[in-house]
Amino acid sequence: MPESRADQVHHLKAACSNCSVLELCLPIGLTGQEIERLDTLIVQRLKVRKSAALYRAGDPLRSLYAVRIGSFKTSVLSVDGREQVTGFQIPGEMLGLDAISTDRHACNAIALEDSEVCPIHFAHLEKLAHELPSLQHNLNRVLSREIVRDHDMLMMLGNMNSDERLAAFLLNFSQRFHTRGYSSSNFVLKMRREEIGSYLGLRLETICRGIAHLRDQGLVEISGRNVTIRNMDGLKQLVVGCHRHLS
Amino acid sequence: MPESRADQVHHLKAACSNCSVLELCLPIGLTGQEIERLDTLIVQRLKVRKSAALYRAGDPLRSLYAVRIGSFKTSVLSVDGREQVTGFQIPGEMLGLDAISTDRHACNAIALEDSEVCPIHFAHLEKLAHELPSLQHNLNRVLSREIVRDHDMLMMLGNMNSDERLAAFLLNFSQRFHTRGYSSSNFVLKMRREEIGSYLGLRLETICRGIAHLRDQGLVEISGRNVTIRNMDGLKQLVVGCHRHLS
DNA sequence: CGTGTGTTTGATGAATTTCAAAGCAGGTGG
DNA sequence: CCACCTGCTTTGAAATTCATCAAACACACG
């Protein structure tokens, strides 16, 4: 017995609430039948315990993943064992996009807390995308957006001092939590100072000091991993008016 | 009168010699007819004068571009006018991938010298990719590879000191020239020191000093924009044994 | 209650930026 | 052909930021 389109959209949402599979599929006009097919992609769930790897660099690409619950870090390891954190993912965000280039994962994805993801079998996704052009288009967009984000990151590392980077980091999380329906001024960072530091190109001690500076200016209240933003505009000004000038 | 497949491949190569359109299309089995259709994508050429913009941030995405001759830099401008260089493109490389996410270009592409590109009309490409799944797959890969590259860049900015970054930069160009069939030990950098600095998250003076250091160690010979690599292995050792340790 | 992991703060030193000035190359016009 | 710009590069010295080393602290957990 065929469901109505609205029912099916609802079903899809329920199957993977908060997932960016939605991001991938929903903004576009699909028929009920098409949605039904998308549905087959994302029926599974996968739990990942804190500190466990969802995948590791070198693993063959089987699936992309959408975070349902919890959070992850992605990192690359250099030959001599140093870790560079390349990103953090919260519910609704995608993991594994960098594996498409070689059919092998290029980084490690580690759960920062007990988490749950939706695997999206990549071969199926490609096949389905072939039949649904707008899905393909959206996949392209998701990939491209990742590139834009990375460029913003490069901008940050190239032009900002430590306090500005930290402010930008907090604002970034604030904004991402906001778009996912959580508070933009009050949230918990699940990663350690050292991981924030790696991500921002700074040492953990510098992160601590940066936190102290922002606190002294009355911009934030941070105790442990609990963040409250007290003066959103002040933080933003720090970031836009950042310190280097055209020579 | 139908050409043979080999002829058509040859025709395609001639139409856009050195273009990464090839990268996009050739590694995969296509029929002669399919190649003929690809051909229709890339018949045009576009000249861009030194210092002129191929596109600017905010421009609507019409085409992706493959560099045929010359070179480009891509950069983003922050509100207060600072420029952050996000990449350099030499013949055979693609421009414009970051525009797919919003249908508008996210950065400026400026010619570093008189140059020539192949525009690839994006709507046509998507349409054609839809009909040729392996083309679609390759487009995905090109996008994904860009993400991997950016992550390498983040790694570099996070973990390397100025001399190491410069060495990595030179090796990167060496390798890219090599894969395009040019000398890997002797090439010309078309950008200014300031632009290298922006890209590497350093000031132009630091680039100059870094060059002097590498020269003093007998690793390279650099006069003006002319680069000769004297000791490739020495350079590589600098990069892999880079300075920061796990705490 | 100890142990281990993660965080904070201080003191020191090294690396990089900043400011300043001089040098160099390529192009233009006299 | 030379003199003179202009834009880019190089080098030096001083100032600043951040990393490093070290020690104390906080907290969760067995």
Image (cartoon, coloured by chain):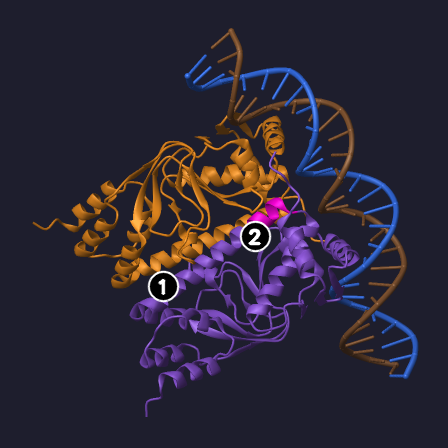
Chain colours: A orange, B purple, C brown, D blue
Residue ID for mark 1: B137
Q: CA distance from mark 2 to mark 1?
A: 25 Å
The foreground one among B242 and A73 is B242
The answer to whether dots 2 and 1 both sit on one chain is: yes
The foreground one among A228 and A69 is A69
Residue D17 screen position, x and y as percent: 69, 38
Residue B21 screen position, x and y as percent: 45, 72
The foreground one among D8 and B174 is B174
Residue A178 screen position, x and y as percent: 41, 38
Position above or below: B54 against A153: below
What's the mark number on residue A209? Answer: none
Secondary-structure class at tag 1: helix
Asked if the magenta segment contains residue B30, the reply would be: no
Q: Which amino acid does the dot numbered 2 rest on?
A: Met
In the current view of this chain or complex, which residue is farthest to the front?
B233
In the current view of this chain or complex, which residue is farthest to the left?
A1
**What are the residue bounds of the magenta stretch?**
B154-160
Q: Residue at x 71, y 66 (%)?
A: B227
Q: Residue at x 47, y 74 (%)?
A: B119
Q: Which image quadrant: the N terminus of chain B?
A: bottom left
The chain that hosts pointer 1 is B
Q: Earlier in the sequence, mark 2 or mark 1?
A: 1
Q: In this orientation, does residue A216 appear?
A: yes
Position above or below: A138 against B6: above
The foreground one among D6 and B40 is B40
Residue A48, image quadrant: top left
Q: Main secondary structure of the magenta part?
A: helix
What's the mark number on residue B153? Answer: 2
Secondary-structure class at tag 2: helix
Q: Number of numbered discs present?
A: 2
Residue B190, image quadrant: bottom right
